Image: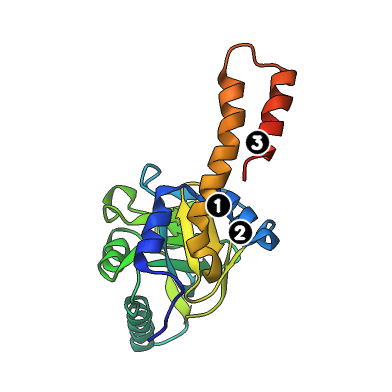
Amino acid sequence: MTSYPFTAADLEALRQWDTPTICNALEVVAPHRRGYGFTVRPMTAVFPKLPPICGLARTGTQRAAFPSGRSKQADKEMRIAWYSYVADAALPTIVCLQDLDDTPGVGAFWGEVNSAVHKGLGAQGVVTNGSVRDLDMFAPGFQGIAGVVNPSHAHVHIVAVNVEVTIHGMQVKHDDVVHADLHGAVVIPHDVVTKIPAAIDLLTRKEKVILDMARAPGFNIERLKEALSQSEDIH
């Protein structure tokens, strides 16, 4: 059994903060990650008001523009292999499925059925550059962060399971920790998961000085300079 330097409770704790705040914290605890490791294109959240999701990545690829070229039985076996892979996890998961089509989103893998199935298998949601549909029938509480919304599943099929994927600029591999919400998603290195809360506390205290000053009557450039100086002194 794989061991991790964090627990399910640690992952759950990170759901109280939005993904931009997690990215801010990563700039403190993993400064080398400042310029990569997150999605860089607009995405659509099925449930914009749903709390953030955070879990271990279950990765794969799909296509939908053309038939798979496999037999019906082979397609079924691949689908079962995918479901078995997603289900094999000791901690909460997030599915990261890359659409390989030249125009991602031709066919939606994610709708009423697969959102219910994957929720039942322990996944909190999906992050994909592909499409979602059945928005009013998506499994309650199962988040979909997608590149496109469309009405058809076309020829959608799983291509590969447990492979490194790239979703809107974010590279993800099996068991990476992924945090996502309506803003997009970010990968959190295993060795800094438990350091995130303290970093957020520090950043919150530093920002509070500036925000309190900016929102107070009489704010001007001199008060801003004062606030910036005070913020820099907080450690």
Dot 1 and dot 2 residues touching (CB under 8 Å): yes
Residue at the image point whose x is 67% and y is 56% from the top? 34
Q: How far separated are the C-alphas under marks 1 and 2?
A: 7 Å
Which three-letter amino acid code belongs to the residue tagged 1? Ala
On screen, residue 149 above or below 33: above
**Side (left or right) of 122 relative to 104:** left
Q: Which mark is residue 91?
A: none
Give the SS element for disc 1: helix
Q: Residue furthest top?
A: 218
Marks 1 and 3, the one that precedes in the sequence? 1
In the depicted structure, whether residue 174 falls above or below residue 25? below
Q: Position of residue 38 (x, y in %)?
A: 59, 58
Estimate the spatial distance between the alpha carbons at disc 1 and disc 3, rounded to whole Å: 14 Å
- Picture residue at 41% right of the left edge, 83% below the top: 2
Residue 17 vertical position relative to residue 127 in the rendered view, above or below: above
Q: Residues within 10 Å of mark 3 (few under 14, many from 20)?
A: some
Please give the label number shown on residue 199. 1
- The label nearer to you, 3 versus 2, is 3
From where the camera sits, is residue 106 visible?
Answer: no
Q: Tell me how far mark 3 sits from mark 2, CA to CA.
A: 18 Å
Q: Position of residue 189 (x, y in %)?
A: 56, 67
Question: Residue beneath label 2, please?
Answer: 29
Image coords of residue 80 (percent x, y): 32, 82
> Which mark is first along the chain, 2 or 3?
2
> How does the figure colour the protein chain or chains?
rainbow
Residue at image position (29%, 53%) is 141
On the image, numbered disc 3 is attached to which residue? Answer: 231
* Mark 1 or 2, nearer chain start: 2
